[in-house]
Amino acid sequence: MKTSFIHTADWQIGKQFANIKGDIAAFLREARFDVIKTLAGLANQHKADAILVAGDVFDANEVSDTTIRKTLNAMQEYKGPWVLLPGNHDPALAQSVWTRMKNLPEKTDNIILALEPESISVANDKLLILPAPLKLRHEYKDLTEWYDTFQAPSSAFKVGLAHGSIEGFLPESAEIHNMISYQRTEKAELDYLALGDWHGQMKVSTKAWYAGTPEQDRFQDNEPGKALLVTLNKNDDVPRVESLDTGKYQWHKIQFAIFTANDIEALNDDFSKFQSAKNQVISLSLDGNLSLENRQKLEQLLDSWKAKFAMLEIDDTNLKLSPSEQDLQDFQSAGFLSNTLEKLLAIKENESNEQHPFADRAIQMLWQELQSNKGVG
């Protein structure tokens, strides 16, 4: 006997991306609907028997009915069973996103809501799903304990579906609630444990995996933007697990030091290595020291890439200005601008001056004014 399914988690449909400035936030929200269609396409392509979603389907229980309807519509491209588990973002409260979803006409019979710790049989009874739904945002007991005493009524594959932190396995910064025993797969004799909550793809053991979010949603390099194709075979001791790329946007946090024009060219070269620039979400932290002329070159470069990337967020707090001899000579020929520069340089050197934090930017603007006057001349 053999079966296969798609394991995914942490869609967080309806996430607002409130910390993201500009129009890109709307595109990031829409991408979370699009990735459902990608998952459906992969399930069809690989002839998967089911799609298991291990929690946090929605970002919050308060998402609108329109958001729920759009989610259900996106799922229509795969006609096999979808098994949806409540997570810590969308727990199965008395009144929740799940109680509203039940009554919507877009909710078809193949969309199964795993709202109770009760076995769910799919794939012509080849696959027995054991869900551990969260009914509170924070649970203080292991909701997968019931797996250990469950008596399977047949020889179907037993697959746990849970949302939380594997005890003693994830980094200390991970959620400390909703703990799951590391030994659960062995104790319950599971064929596979499909996990959600950790947004990066991660192998816990040969029979337990975090799928990660299918569409990256933060600056963290932990294998996001993926799903898992899991194949179970009675002739094999362990499942075959294949990672599938699903995400549209890639998020990158970059630190770069700039001192010369060559460094600016090097930054441009690094940016040019990204494939599909329009799908890159970049957070760039700059440090170093630049002349006014080179700072202007940098600004021109960054403005160019802002128009190519999905987002280019820049922190140049630690990038300082140091006018070169040529910069100073240019100012000396400009009369009143030279006097203004001297005052700004004095403020720049005096950290106790309340205007000190703004001096570099003011000098840069003064330089731009100088170049503008040159053009007029």
Image (tube, rainbow, N blue to C red):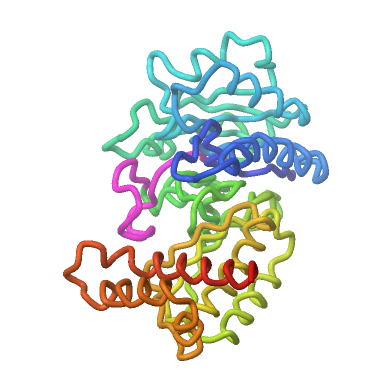
Horizontal side of residue 215 vs 42, given as left or right: left
The number of numbered badges drawn on the structure is 0
Q: 157 or 293, which is in the foreground? A: 293
Q: Position of residue 99 (x, y in %)?
A: 49, 13
Residue at the far left: name it.
Answer: 352
At horizontal 60% and vertical 33% (from top left) the residue drawn is 128
Q: Position of residue 375 (x, y in %)?
A: 64, 70
At horizontal 49% and vertical 57% (from top left) the residue drawn is 219
Residue 240 seen anywhere in this rendered image of the structure: no
Residue at the far bottom: name it.
Answer: 325
Q: 173 or 365, which is in the foreground? A: 365
Horizontal side of residue 367 vs 244, given as left or right: left
Quarter in which the N terminus is drawn: top right
Query: Looking at the picture, does residue 176 appear above or below residue 34?
Result: below
* Residue 178 painted magenta: yes
Residue 202 seen anywhere in this rendered image of the structure: yes
Q: 162 or 127, which is in the foreground? A: 162
Q: 181 or 356, which is in the foreground? A: 356
Q: Position of residue 189 (x, y in %)?
A: 50, 47
Horizontal side of residue 168 vs 315, given as left or right: left
* The residue stretch that appears in magenta: 159-180
Query: Looking at the picture, does residue 101 appear above or below residue 181?
Result: above
Quarter in which the C terminus is drawn: bottom right
Q: Which image quadrant for residue 315? A: bottom left
